[in-house]
Amino acid sequence: MDACPESQLESPVDTHASPKRRGAFTSRWNLLAAFPVTLLAFAVAAAINPPQSGPLAVGLVFEPHLFLAVLVALAPVALLGRARILALTLVVTFATGGLLFGSEWISLPGSGAGRHDISVMTWNVQYHTRTPAEQAAQLEGVTADLIALQEVEPDAASAIAGDAVLTAHYPFRALAPRVGASGLVVLSRYPISNVDSQDGPPCLDLWVNTPQGKVHVIVAHPTHATIVKRTRLGVPDSYRTLDRDEAIVMLRPRINAALAAGDRVLVLGDFNTASSEAEYSVLSAGLRDTHVEVGEGPGWTWRPSRLTFLPFDLLRIDLQLTAGAIRPVSTSIDCSLPGDHCRLFGDYEIDS
């Protein structure tokens, strides 16, 4: 039998080495504490003055992912390497991430209401992803009482309007199709009234007459932030949110008027803002976020077009928001159909 080689691979900490040598390995692993410390510094700076352009703005969009990546990558190192300084910074990172994003992932038991008075689906169908006939057919199996669609072009809207199954299930509809990404459609089992449509930003403002009373529904699709890729790898090196932020600000007068009137308000759509971005607070002020109230897990609803093969998404930018006497009961997503957005479902209780 050959003798064992003198040089062998070492574990993060050699338990048979001298205390001095073990301490040297431990101090090396502690150097990795620079990563969570940098992330914590970024989180504090972003909370004080959120970046609205450049790489730091991209970092803000993916801030929850950065916290997850640091914890998942470095926690085993801190444990196996017995790196106390690294472990301490990871504990602080975990606590900070929980404070910032805990409600995004975990809802308190019993936070939902008791009845299911109205069910809702919102979906950005991503124009040019399917034929008009396919678009109509993929809606036939939906059982929600109210459907809000974004990026519906005129030919797709015509197919939806002419589909006999959809007409039987959803006899009431508001159609505002547009060429490109600005078209909106609402289908309802219950009567629709007072429909108002605008283009800047795309918005449908209407009332739905449910058996429990009227619900004020606002469906919108603000433009996305501008992403510029000048590198060979296609990595974003510029991110500007000005147009998106202005579009959300332009929506607020409608929302504010509904809140001031004490309406049962349901705000639906693809808002192109992650909950870690500053503009999310502008959009959701005075409203309850259904996922935050009753959702479990990250609730991500969007993924890049190159990654549509994934059975899950990467950002939560499709939202259902409420105010007044309409309260979230449950929510779920379905990422099984083609496109860069999942279908987002919500159930609600309505007080008469």
Image (cartoon, grey):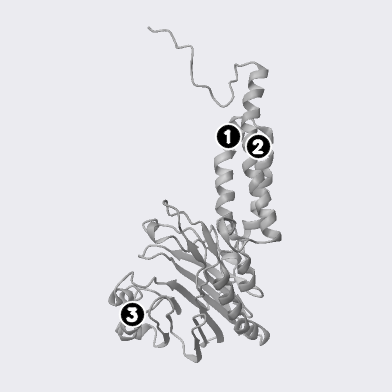
Residue 39 location, x and y as percent?
63, 48
Q: Residues within 10 Å of mark 3 (few under 14, many from 20)?
A: many
> Who comes first in sequence, dot 1 or dot 3?
1
Classify residue 87 as left or right of residue 220. Answer: right
Which residue is the site of mark 2? 86
Q: In whole angstroms, how far apart are the C-alphas of marks 1 and 3? A: 52 Å
The kind of secondary structure element at disc 3 is helix
Circles 2 and 1: CB atoms closer than 8 Å = yes
Residue 80 location, x and y as percent?
58, 30
The kind of secondary structure element at disc 2 is helix
> Who comes first in sequence, dot 2 or dot 1?
1
Task: State the mark number for residue 156.
Answer: 3
The kind of secondary structure element at disc 1 is helix
Of residues 244 and 349, which is closer to you in this image? Answer: 244
From this view, report whether residue 21 is shown above or below residue 35. Answer: above
> Who comes first in sequence, dot 3 or dot 2?
2
Classify residue 224 as left or right of residue 94. Answer: left
Residue type beneath disc 3: Ala
Residue 132 location, x and y as percent?
30, 77
Which residue is the site of mark 1? 77
Residue type beneath disc 1: Val
